[in-house]
Image (tube, helix red, strand yellow):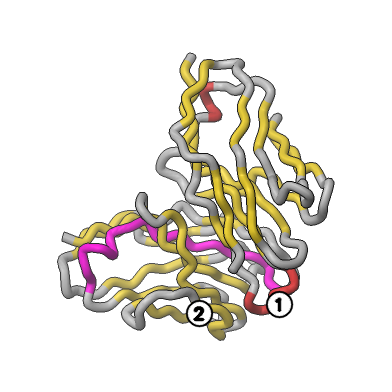
């Protein structure tokens, strides 16, 4: 079945460092791909998404490119801030699953940014 | 628009009891999904309701059930609570149909003692 694999955390960076969180997936067909972020004590927020190969999703300085050849959707940010400290989740959804469509989640990667 | 709201935010129960959690979706959203989040298992899908009908279900025992009302508000119920049911329960809503993007509430933190 479909699955998502994320790099294990925690990831600890200094402010203004470059961030990469790896995400790879296994799916039949052409899934939609998402990054969600969960700040401490809060629910999940959609960070960005991409729905087809070579699409780049971007938001708040974060980017991820849908790479079908490597089945990857790595999250990047050029200069992290303390306020980016959170848990980041990669997820996929099969748009052809019709009413059975649901999000398949990675286990999450915790990011801590130190001043 | 107001966001997804979940009540209560925190619950403490003892083994064997039952609990009911509530989720009010964003106005116009007809689909409500429930997830269980634990440190060991991550996010696991419980079920999805659309227009008062369950249309998708995860691999959870029958102790976990849900329903949706005509105003799209949803409740989930867990009966005969076990220690392992301690988790953050998240509700996510979307417009329905072909829309992928889900919007999450803040969650209900359930602790079973």
What subunit carries mark 1?
A
What subunit carries mark 2?
B
Element type at mark 2: strand
* Image side of residue B22 versus residue B68, left or right: left
Q: Which mark is residue A110?
A: none
The one nearer the camera, B55 or B6, is: B55
Element type at mark 1: helix
Crowding around mark 1 (Cα neighbors within 10 Å: few <14, some 14 to 19, many 20+) is few
The residue lying at 69 percent from left, 53 percent from top is A33
> Residue A94 is drawn in which quadrant?
bottom right
The span from disc 2 to disc 1 (Cα, nearest Å) is 20 Å
Note whether A49 is above or below A82 in the view shown. below
Q: Which mark is residue B68?
A: 2
Residues marked 2 and 1, same chain: no
* Image side of residue A91 versus residue B11, left or right: right
Identify the residue under disc 1: A98
Per the rendered image, the range of residues in magenta is: B81-97
The residue lying at 57 percent from left, 22 percent from top is A81
The residue lying at 41 percent from left, 68 percent from top is B22
């Amino acid at each position: 079945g479909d699955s998502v694999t994320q790099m294990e955390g925690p990831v600890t960076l200094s402010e203004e460092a470059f961030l990469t969180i790896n995400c790879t997936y296994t799916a039949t067909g052409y899934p939609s791909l998402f990054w969600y972020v969960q700040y401490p004590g809060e629910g999940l927020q959609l960070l960005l998404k991409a729905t087809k190969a070579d699409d780049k999703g971007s938001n708040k300085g974060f980017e991820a490119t849908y790479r079908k050849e490597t089945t990857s959707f790595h999250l990047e940010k050029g200069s992290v801030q303390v306020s980016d400290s959170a848990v980041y989740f990669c997820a996929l959804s099969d748009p052809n699953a019709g009413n059975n469509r649901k999000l398949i989640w990675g286990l999450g990667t915790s990011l801590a940014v130190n001043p | 628009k107001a966001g997804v709201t979940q009540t209560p935010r925190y619950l403490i129960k003892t083994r064997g009891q039952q609990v009911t959690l509530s989720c009010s979706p964003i106005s116009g959203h007809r689909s409500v999904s429930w997830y269980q989040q634990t440190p060991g298992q991550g996010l696991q899908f419980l079920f999805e309701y659309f227009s008062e009908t369950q249309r998708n279900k995860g691999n959870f025992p029958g102790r976990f059930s849900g329903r949706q009302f005509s105003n799209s508000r949803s409740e989930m119920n867990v009966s005969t609570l076990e220690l392992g049911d301690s988790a953050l329960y998240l509700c996510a809503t979307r417009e329905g149909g072909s829309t992928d993007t889900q919007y999450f509430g803040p969650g209900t933190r359930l602790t079973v003692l």
